[in-house]
Each structure stands twice: as structure tokens, then as C-alpha cells.
Amino acid sequence: MAYALDPAAEAAGYSLEVHDSLGSTSTLAMERARAGLPAPLWVVTRRQTAGRGRRGSSWTSPAGNLAASLAWPVPAGLTPERVATLGFVAGVSLEQALRRACGPSPDPAAEFRLKWPNDVLAGGAKLAGILLEYEAGPAGAAVVIGFGVNVAAAPEGLPYPATALAALGRPADAPGLFRLLTGTWMAAAGLWDEGRGFPAIRAAWLAAAAGLGGPVTVEAGDTRLTGTFETIDAGGRLVLRLGDGTHRTVSAGAVHVGRAAGAI
């Protein structure tokens, strides 16, 4: 199957670049943004050799997996703080696209779940990651949203469990999943409405959240906090209830949920 946009994305003026191999879809998408974007642009590759993740991590995405990035021109007046909530739009979009591509899981414990701030889990293992990069330059501000989904295979040798749709017996292919994602993105971005509709996105994200109401540990630098994952607030920050009943709001960090929270 060839890569293509959902008709709603095409009608809205989104464009698409497809490559056989790239170092990073996000790197190329940001280069296009620096040159000036008249409309949002999707960049997708069949094989990615130097993908980027949070905290400078990198990985190779083999053929059969999905590696795609969206370069989105930021409207004038939209603050970086509001742009940052697009990460939750991306999470909701990807979770919905995965459900549409694969259907319901025969095992409820293996359903797709959103892990704060930007991963998708299946059966407690990482299935997908999302990365936001914001830049303001002479051509205007832009955000690049990178999506990496283990469709055919999961990387090995990671310090955390990882899985792939093929290993889960969830039939899907990268081009089909991508086309669905471009459509679910349109719906979620419309709901978000430049941040005005974030409460609705927040509700959708929480409905699919991993570990909500359970134990969670957050590591940020030399700080480690363990408590109960209560919610995310109006800015998308994680709200943690500590053992003494007080609350802490976390804006960034590595999160471990469920059994993993007590294992580190």
C-alpha cells in the first residue's frame, strides 16, 4: 500500500513527502519549516536510520514500522505553552488511529494506553513514542511532531519493555496506519481549536491514560517522586498525590507506572 493522506487532510491543504530512507523525519520536517511553510506538511519514510527521542535518545526504525513527522506552522499569537499541549492532541490522535487500524484487543490488559507525557503502551510495553520540537525563526514559528510506531518489530536491548503490533497479533500496516493517523489528527486538532478546546482533549487523553489512579514514579534529574497518578491539569502537567496526602505538579520527567513504579 502506498502512503497517502486522509481526504480530510488533503482538503485542508496538508501536503505529504514520502522517502525510502531518511536519517530523521523530524530533522527534515524542521528544515522545511525553517524555509517557510504555507500549510502543514507530513514527512514519512519507509526506513529511518537516526530517529530522535526524548532526552537525546536515538533509534533505527526498520522497514515496516511507521516513522512520520508533522511540520505545523504556529498561528501568530499562540504561546509556546499552548503549543506544548499539542502533544496530547498527538497522543489522542495516535491512540484512536491504532484502535481503528487494529480493532479491540481480545485481552483487555493489552489495550492501547497513553503514558504521560508522550508514549503509547500495549500490555505495559512501549509501542510508540511522540516527540514535539518547537522553533521560532525568521520564517515564523513552527512545531514538528514526530511519531514512531513499532508496527512490524520492536527495538531490542532497551532498558524498558517494548513491543510491536506484529508481536501482539494486531494486524496493521504502516501506510494504512499513517492514513488513519492523518485523519484522526484532523479531528483532534479541530477539537483542540488552537488550545481553546484543550479541556475536551484532556478528557479524551485521560480516558485512555495508563496508570491513572495507581502508583507512579517520576524521575527528573536527581529528583524522584513516588505517589498516585491523580490526573493531568489544565496545562497538561501530571498531578501526583504523595504518601503524606500533599500534591505535586510535574511538568517533565521519566515516568514509571504500575509495577514498574515500585521496581526502580
Image (cartoon, rainbow, N blue to C red):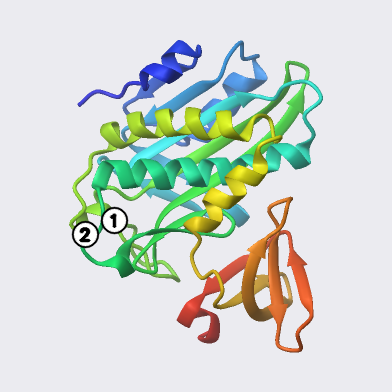
Residue 223 drawn above or below residue 235: below
Marks 1 and 2, how far apart at CA: 5 Å
Q: Position of residue 198 (x, y in %)?
A: 66, 42
Residue assigned mark 1: 164
Residue 229, position as x, y percentages in the image: 61, 72
Q: Secondary structure at mark 1?
A: loop
| Three-letter code, disc 2 | Ala
Give the residue number, with chain letter if any, for mark 2. 167
Instruction: Give the mark count.
Output: 2
Q: Residue at x 69, y 72 (%)?
A: 240
Query: Badge 2: how crowded within 10 Å, few (<14), some, or many (20+)?
Result: few
Q: Is residue 52 visible?
A: no
In the rendered structure, the answer to whether residue 3 lies left or right of residue 70 reads left
Kind of residue indicated by mark 1: Ala
Does residue 32 show up?
yes
- Density class for disc 1 (Cα within 10 Å; few <14, some 14-19, many ≥20) is many
